[in-house]
Amino acid sequence: MTTPGPLTIRAFQQLIRDRYFATDSARGPAGTFILLIEEVGELATALHDNRPGKSPTPEQQANLAEEFADVIAWLATLANIHGVDLEHALAKYTTPGVVEGVKD
């Protein structure tokens, strides 16, 4: 499934829901959270391999991008299990005065 134009957060969350919700909801929130944290650990390793001052290989750089994507996918999965619309939730960052540090 591809989306025309830019991929929105809502469209990505729906794509994850369409593909994986049955399996994800059967696993439940606790098991899904553990998998999210596992991916965060893999992202930490990739960040370490790509830290400033080091010359990462193209493979290491590609792995970094993959790990960022995996963390977002597992976060969307967890949000789906809990019925959270991430695009709606993230709107707080675009509304001045809601989150400290957000300017007009």
Image (cartoon, rainbow, N blue to C red):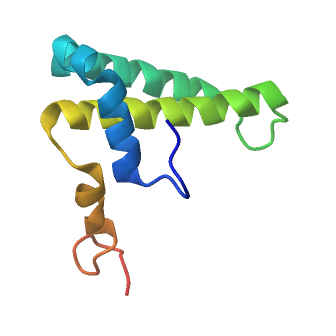
In the rendered image, residue 65, in percent from the top left (x then y), is placed at 63, 36
Left or right of residue 49: residue 34: left
Count of numbered labels shown in the rendering: 0
In the rendered image, residue 67, in percent from the top left (x then y), is placed at 56, 29
Determine whether 2 is above or below 4 in the image: above
Q: Foreground: 75 or 53? A: 75
Determine whether 24 is above or below 67 in the image: above
Left or right of residue 78: residue 49: right
- Corner quadrant of residue 38: top left
User: What's the residue at 44%, 32% (across, down)?
Assistant: 71
User: What's the residue at 74%, 34% (across, down)?
Assistant: 61
In the rendered image, residue 11, in percent from the top left (x then y), is placed at 38, 48
**Quadrant placement of the C terminus:** bottom left
- Corner quadrant of residue 79: top left
Determine whether 2 is above or below 8 in the image: above
Q: Foreground: 38 or 15? A: 15
In the displayed orientation, state which residue is furthest to the bottom: 104
Regarding residue 78, the answer to whether it shows in the image is yes
In the rendered image, residue 98, in percent from the top left (x then y), is placed at 22, 73
User: What's the residue at 28%, 76% (across, down)?
Assistant: 95
Regarding residue 47, the answer to whether it shows in the image is no
Q: Foreground: 86 or 7? A: 7
User: What's the residue at 78%, 25% (across, down)?
Assistant: 59
